[in-house]
Image (cartoon, rainbow, N blue to C red):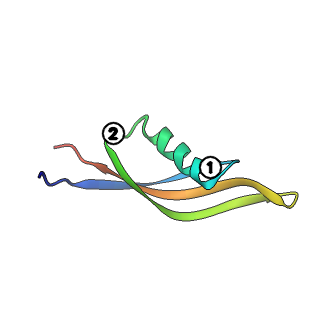
């Protein structure tokens, strides 16, 4: 088994539908420029309210990816 070194970054994703979609949106966007993403951790959740209902979900996630040799 090979030992790996990981780097982590924080991303903020948003969605008007769900927390899960906010995470997916952040990861999908990051995958366009970050290779070898391996894991994520939800750090913070929040949202905005308009007219008494949830208007948007926002999550801050930490994403780990493998550093290349």
Asked if the residues shown at circle 1 and circle 2 are in contact, with their CB atoms under 8 angstroms apart, the answer is no
The residue that disc 2 covers is: 35
Q: Nearer the viewer, residue 60 or 22?
A: 22
Q: Residue 65: percent from the left, percent from the top?
A: 32, 49
Label 1, residues with CA under 10 Å away: few <14, some 14-19, many ≥20: many
Q: Name the residue furthest right.
A: 51
Question: In this image, 1 relative to 48: left or right?
Answer: left
Q: Residue at x 47, y 45 (%)?
A: 27
For the residues labelled 1 and 2, the Cα–Cα distance comes to 21 Å
Q: Toward which corner of the image does residue 53 lie, by quadrant?
A: bottom right
Q: Residue at x 57, y 52 (%)?
A: 20
Q: Toward which corner of the image does residue 44 lie, by quadrant?
A: bottom right
Which comes before the other along the chain, label 1 or label 2? 1
The residue that disc 1 covers is: 14
Q: Quick one: quadrant of the C terminus?
A: top left
Question: In this image, 22 relative to 3: left or right?
Answer: right
Q: Residue at x 42, y 38 (%)?
A: 31
Q: Name the residue furthest bottom.
A: 44
């Amino acid at each position: 088994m090979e030992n790996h070194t990981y780097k982590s970054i924080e991303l903020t994703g948003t969605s008007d539908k769900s927390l899960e979609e906010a995470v997916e949106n952040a990861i999908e966007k990051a995958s366009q420029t970050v290779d070898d993403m391996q894991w994520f951790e939800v750090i913070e959740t929040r949202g905005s309210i308009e007219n008494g209902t949830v208007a948007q979900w926002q999550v801050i996630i930490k994403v780990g990816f493998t550093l290349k040799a």
